[in-house]
Amino acid sequence: MDVSGMSLGRRRAFDAAFVLMLLGLPITTEYLAIAFVHYDAALVWPDAGFWSRIEAPSWRCAGLYVLWVAFQAALFHGLPGRTVEGAPLPDGRRLEYRLNGLAAFGITLAVAALGVASGLVPASLLYDHLGELVSTMNVVVLVGAIGLAVFARTQADASERRLNWIEAYTLGACRNPRIGRFDLKFFCESRPSMILWILIDLSFAAKQIELHGRLSPAMGLVVAFQLLYLVDYFWFEDAILTTWDIKHEGFGFILAWGCMVWIPASYALQPLYLVGHPDPLPTLALVPIGLLGLVGFLLFRTSNLQKHRFSSDPMAPIWGEKPEFIRTEQGRLLLVSGWWGIARHVNYLGDWLFGLAWSLTCGFGRVLPYFYPIYFAILLVHREWRDARHCARKYGADWRRYTERVRWRIVPGLY
């Protein structure tokens, strides 16, 4: 988000909004942890008694969390992997990135399994200390973002140096802060957060086995779905480099917190609910839910592959036919074939359907297990609106031709 060109009054309004976000975002994760653990995932009004259940951060947990991040950083920096170039920067440079996420994930799982098998680490550790972990992650990122802002200022370009300290802290003082070849944003975008999310899932599954003596089909399905999501994420790790966050956003508190805290604290809510509700639906009901999840995943993956292959080779066939596209004045090709001729962001629809299937495994007894698809729908609609506004400014009449050709934004026939 570029705020440097805003009027003084509007920038002050944005700064006030950022300060509110610094308070509101961590409170949201605390609310979710308390509601799921202490109120059986009920949507309750947070009175004084509710907030008294917040678990304080601890130095022990902070030390372990920092050690976790350091371990992932060592894997990120030290493991071999394919080296690729990112998107061109405003000055024309292309940064290099090493892709080794799948190897890092495999090594992490092996180390975790060894720790559990040896008795050094209880399998349910992350479940048993969930509230403490959420509070600690919030504090570590809130404080760590101060150091990030100070460091990133040293690498900021002229436009980024026009940000005041509130904006530099929240939005990021630099788009791509690096320590040598170690890209801080790319690292935080995936490694500590995404891998921790799956370890939390597995800890919740272990707790269900501890309490009920078995792994329920619903828990098995949702953990398998989320494991598939992560393996796919790292298998196509180079796709991360084409996302809006990597290409355009500065790296400050908002993005760091979203990656480091929001993902592990909110993406595992369905397994958390299933710890205490192992069988919210008949087992046969999981069959259509599983099919819905697979349809969503395949729609998400095949549409993204079409776009990726088209970017690499605009003449590569799509659905057995030569692809159609609109060429902009800037020379950019806007794909209007395959899934991308049906909706402008049909990949968003697939991603959302996959996430909806996660929540459907929890049945219909509570609203909060559906927090992820509700939040994600809002996020995707906003993301599509932001992208459309950006493209309309960039491509002008060519973008209008494109939207006339591809009418639907995300959901064909509906939106």
Image: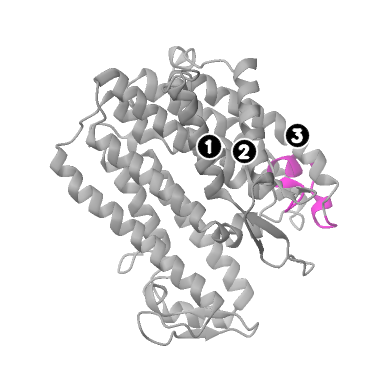
Res 60 quadrant in image: top right
Residue 281 picture location, percent across and down: 18, 36
Query: Disc 2 and disc 1: Cα gap in Å?
Result: 8 Å
Q: Which residues are magenta?
A: 157-176
Q: Which callout, 1 or 3, points to the residue nearer the camera?
A: 1
- Give the residue type that dot 1 points to: Thr
Quadrant in which the N terminus is drawn? bottom right
Rendered position, 329 above or below 134: below
Disc nearer the start of the sequence (2/1): 2
Residue 146, labelled with which disc?
3
Residue 243 lies, with reference to residue 279, above or below; the image says: below
- In the rendered image, residue 164, in percent from the top left (x then y), is placed at 80, 44
- Please identify the quarter of the rendering in which residue 387 is found: bottom right
Which residue position is annotated with label 1? 108
Colouring convention used in this rendered image of the protein: one colour
Whether residue 43 appears in this view of the structure is: no
Decide whether residue 195 is among the magenta residues: no
